[in-house]
């Protein structure tokens, strides 16, 4: 596991997915998976289709990570992955459409993990 991924999964709600780390956001009717790819040093945002496995798998409730109400709730996902459920397929979304409070929170998590927070702003 990349050192960056190991550091990021110590942040609330993040988990390792191979060479990436993922956290889920659920707020205002939007369901988004946020992934940081260590090798590319990039963040991607994905839609999470209704019914896709974003539950915790352990019966724990969603965790609010202290972000503003505009940033919604971030869920820990230990069951399924975005796009693997029969309810639909995950699709990348432009970062410009992601609410600013959520993007700020992702940059804060990156910074707390010792990762350059500008990675959140870098295009693919």
Image: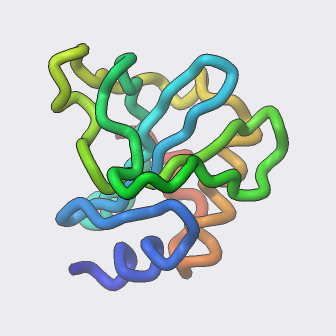
Name the outermost residue toward the front. Answer: 59
Q: Quadrant of residue 107?
A: bottom right
Residue at (54% x, 78% y) in the render? 113
Where residue 59 appears, x then y in whole percent?
43, 52
Marks counted in the figure total 0
Residue 79 versus residue 122: which sits nearer the camera? 79
Q: Quadrant of the N terminus?
A: bottom left
Residue depicted at 61% across the width and 17% down the height: 29
Q: Does residue 111 show up? A: yes
* Image coords of residue 9 (percent x, y): 43, 72
* Colour pattern: rainbow
Q: Quadrant of the C terminus?
A: top left
Q: Establish if 85 lies above or below 120.
A: above
Apparent side of residue 96 relative to residue 20 in the rendered image (left or right): right
Residue 123, by quadrant, is top left
From this view, report whether residue 93 is shown above or below residue 70: above
On screen, residue 88 versus residue 56, left or right, reads: left
Query: As drawn, is 61 to the left or to the right of 8?
Result: right
Residue 20 place in picture, x, y as percent: 28, 60
Along the line of sight, which residue is nearer the eye, 113 or 117? 113
Residue 39: percent from the left, percent from the top? 25, 65
Residue at 61% from the left image edge and 65% from the top image edge: 109
Name of the residue lying farthest toward the right: 68
- The answer to whether residue 42 is seen in the rendering is no
The correct choice, above or below, for 64 with respect to 13 in the image is above
Q: Residue at x 26, y 79 (%)?
A: 2
């Amino acid at each position: 596991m990349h050192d960056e991924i190991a550091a990021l999964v110590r942040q609330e709600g993040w988990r390792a997915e191979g060479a990436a780390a993922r956290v889920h956001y659920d707020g205002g009717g939007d369901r988004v998976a946020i992934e940081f790819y260590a090798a590319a040093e990039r963040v991607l945002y994905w839609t999470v289709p209704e019914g896709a496995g974003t539950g915790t798998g352990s019966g724990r409730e969603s965790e609010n990570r202290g972000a503003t109400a505009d940033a919604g709730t971030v869920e820990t996902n230990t069951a399924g992955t975005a796009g693997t459920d029969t309810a639909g397929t995950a699709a990348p979304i432009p970062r410009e459409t992601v609410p600013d409070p959520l993007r700020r929170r992702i940059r804060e998590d990156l910074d707390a993990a010792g990762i350059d927070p500008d990675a959140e702003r870098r295009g693919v």
